[in-house]
Amino acid sequence: MILYGRNLSPFTRRVLIWCRMQGRAVEQRPLAATEPADAEAIRAVNPVGRVPTLVLEDGTALTESFAICDWLEETAPEGKRLIPASGTARRDCMQRIATAHSTTEKMVAMVYEKNRRPEEHQWPAWQERLKGQIQGGLATMEAAAPETGFHGGAAPDGSDIAVVAAWQFCALTNPWLTEPGYPRLAALVERAMALPDFAETKPG
């Protein structure tokens, strides 16, 4: 399989960690949708020009991290599922993923609004709204973070992947949003970073 996208994209990184944790062989092409030279290659496999895009061995192109990870779960090797199959455990895991995902979307919006847009064209009221949404999401993840181990128990599950990718993207692009601090969440991330699948995919 071929994965299009850089690890700076928390959505791409989520798919990559998911593949690694399931023991799947994947070739990564670290292209950025925001770079003109890369955008054409991305559009060749995804006309919308977004990452991540996962091209399967038969040439099928899967897009959007939620749909990609759903396919990875449906076809997971024995004992390698990262979301519980049913019941309350599945519901809660999916909700943690949804919180991390929606918070990450707001983080990306903040990057475009604050980091990329010229200062004279920035909209302070919109930035304040994004800040409130991001910090609301971080607070929700903080409250849910386990004191020890992972959401998945002794090993991370799919929601741990989503939470770690969200936190580290925020810390890298707009660290001021992580103040005054989320200690349980930060500790969860630190535990995850002791694992190769997380440490080796951290964006620089």
Image (cartoon, grey):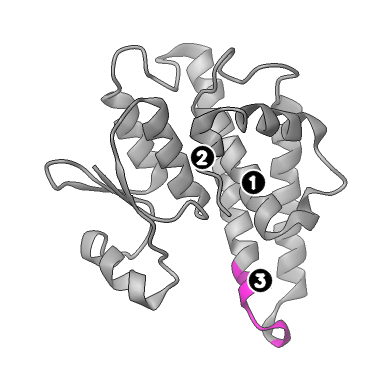
Calculate the distance from the C-alpha at mark 1 to the C-alpha at mark 2.
13 Å
The residue that disc 1 covers is 168
Picture quadrant of residue 185: top right
Q: Position of residue 147 (x, y in %)?
A: 75, 19
Q: Nearer the viewer, residue 194 or 86?
A: 194
Closest to the camera, between mark 1 and mark 2, is: 2
The image quarter in which residue 150 lies: top right
Q: In the rendered structure, which amino acid carries the disc numbered 3? A: Asn
Crowding near the residue tagged with mark 1, few <14, some 14–19, many ≥20 C-alpha atoms within 10 Å = some
Residue on which disc 2 sits? 200
The answer to which of marks 1 and 2 sits earlier in the sequence is 1
Q: Are marks 1 and 2 in contact (CB under 8 Å)?
A: no
118 part of magenta stretch = yes
| Residue type, label 1 | Gln
- Residue in view at x 11 percent, y 42 percent: 58
For the residue carrying disc 3, how many other residues have a C-alpha within 10 Å: few (<14), some (14-19), or many (20+)? some
Q: Secondary structure at mark 3?
A: helix
